[in-house]
Amino acid sequence: MPILELDRVTKSFGALKVADEISFAVEDGEALGIIGPNGAGKSTLFNLVTGNLGLDGGGIRFLGRDVTRLPPMRRCADGLGRTFQIPQPFGKLTVFENLLVAATFGSSCSEAEAAGRCADILVETGLAERANVPAGRLTLLERKRLELARALATDPKLLLLDEIAGGLTEGECLALVETIRTVHRRGVAIVWIEHVLHALNSVVGRLVVLDFGKVIGIGRPDVIMADPKVREIYLGIEV
């Protein structure tokens, strides 16, 4: 059974249709990438999946249940985690305290269980040595790692990553990708929006291509990136 199913998901802002009957499924344990030019509707799609925006039409199923009308906190508690393009941690709280807030309010575990989970996540995301540092003093890479760690602290079964590699150097990007691989290897399903294609394609097994709110292709990364229509729309290459 797919962990996430989108069935003709539709959303408009006035005359602008930002999601045009989008349908696809994510299998349990899969890593799926979403690409498309700026303004294609990628982040809006995440907002629809998480419940931050309401649908105009269609439906969303998570873990086999219809979650179309459930609020964001309920979806998070059920196992839907997310990062944002621009990390906005609680700057005056320490790295560990940021994780503890996410674990306590984003899942149903006890405070003792939350503390133990956060300690493990600090190690997994490479932040153990920065646990007691205020989040406002972190580097960009460390803030990206903290954004990932906070999402993991909610104990997600499906993790939505929104351009988490953006703005990083090549070396920083490679380090973060290895952490994402580790998370995926332990069974967390991933849907990842990203413009850094070499990072994305080193993790995901399929790509979904969006353009003006419509799905224009789904398939293996090598097949998708060789498609003339995708190359013209996404890469700006005339075919």
Image: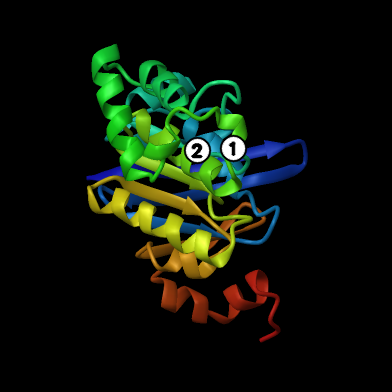
Res. 147 mark:
2
Query: Which residue, as the protein is rendered here, is positioned at the far bottom?
Result: 239
The mark that comes first in sequence, 1 or 2, is 1
Q: Is residue 17 above or below residue 155?
A: below
Q: Position of residue 204 (x, y in %)?
A: 38, 62
Q: Is residue 92 above or below residue 139?
A: above
Name the residue beneath numbered marker 1.
87
The answer to whether residue 88 of the structure is visible from this angle is: no
Res. 33 mark:
none
Is mark 1 in CB contact (under 8 Å) with mark 2?
yes
**The image quarter in which residue 131 lies:** top left
Q: Position of residue 228 (x, y in %)?
A: 58, 81
Q: Answer left or right for 93 relative to 167.
A: left
Query: Which residue is found at the position 51% from the left and 49% from the top?
Result: 22
Q: Amino acid at mark 1?
A: Pro
Crowding near pointer 2: few (<14 within 10 Å), some, many (20+)? many
Query: Which residue is found at the position 43% from the left and 78% from the top?
Result: 223
